[in-house]
Amino acid sequence: MWSKKEKDIARRAFEMALEREGLELLRKIKEMARTAENRKDIWQIHDFLTERRTEIDQKYDYRYSVLIPIFGRLVREEWIRLDELEGLDEDKITKIKIMASLE
Amino acid sequence: MWSKKEKDIARRAFEMALEREGLELLRKIKEMARTAENRKDIWQIHDFLTERRTEIDQKYDYRYSVLIPIFGRLVREEWIRLDELEGLDEDKITKIKIMASLE
């Protein structure tokens, strides 16, 4: 169960992670495009975008039932910091920490 | 039927058109990436590339049985000029001209 306060925290952290990951992708695409020289390079950008888009679409799945593992992954990948989840109950934080250190 | 000489001319014109279209796409992608500001812009680049790649893959089909309509289209779209096909027999040139002016 997620309280109203927890839902607000979760939503904000989720959006922040997505925003950061989007900006990083933007930076990468700009760099790839800037240095691209031929058709092969263009198709490489396309393949890369196809892969990243699929990954991002699958990862950012805002359902409360899967939010704990998602936050675990986002912390592990450093798109959010644990302190940005402050205010979630201790049990959730513990689970997220465990998930974040897996793999 | 395509003579050896005609095949050489056709191949060179075909490659030249593909090269030019690739360079134009490269220019466009660089510009889109340069001015992109957010995730929506990135997905727009991806959608655009998916569409252009499919179109280019389908269009550049080097089989002698379909080369006349392809050259017609490439002339119409200005990826090659008629004088770059000089050396093909008159009958082929006439058909290409007709195809080029269709639509």
Image: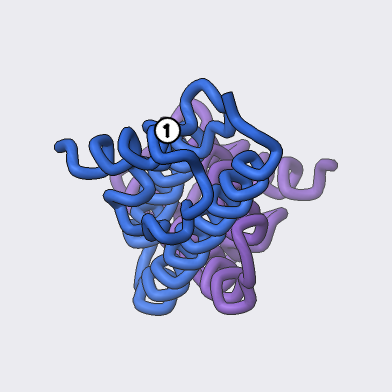
Chain colours: A blue, B purple
**Residue placed at 27% from the left, 49% from the top?**
A76
Q: Which residue lies furthest to the right in this view?
A: B103
Q: Quadrant of the N terminus of chain A?
A: top right
- Write down the residue under mark 1: A68
Q: Which residue lies furthest to the front in this view?
A: A90
**Residue placed at 46% from the left, 56% from the top?**
B18
Q: In which quarter of the image is the C terminus of chain A?
A: top left
Q: What element carries label 1?
A: helix
Classify mark 1: residues with Cα within 10 Å, few (<14), some (14-19) or many (20+).
many
Q: Can residue B10 be seen in this view?
A: no
Q: Name the one closer to the observer, B26 or B64.
A: B26
| x and y, in percent, of residue B13 in the image | 45, 58
In the rendered structure, the answer to whether residue A68 lies left or right of residue A7 reads left
Picture quadrant where residue B82 is located: bottom right
**Residue placed at 36% from the left, 67% from the top?**
A38
Q: Name the one closer to the observer, A78 or A36.
A: A78
**Residue placed at 35% from the left, 77% from the top?**
A35
> In the picture shown, does residue A22 fall above or below A55?
below
Picture quadrant where residue B77 is located: bottom right
| x and y, in percent, of residue A74 in the image | 38, 48
| x and y, in percent, of residue B49 in the image | 55, 50
> In the picture shown, does residue A16 fall above or below B99?
below
Q: Name the one closer to the observer, A51 or A46.
A: A51
Three-letter amino acid code of the residue under disc 1: Ile
| x and y, in percent, of residue B68 in the image | 57, 38
Q: Which chain carries label 1?
A: A
Q: Is residue B14 visible?
A: yes
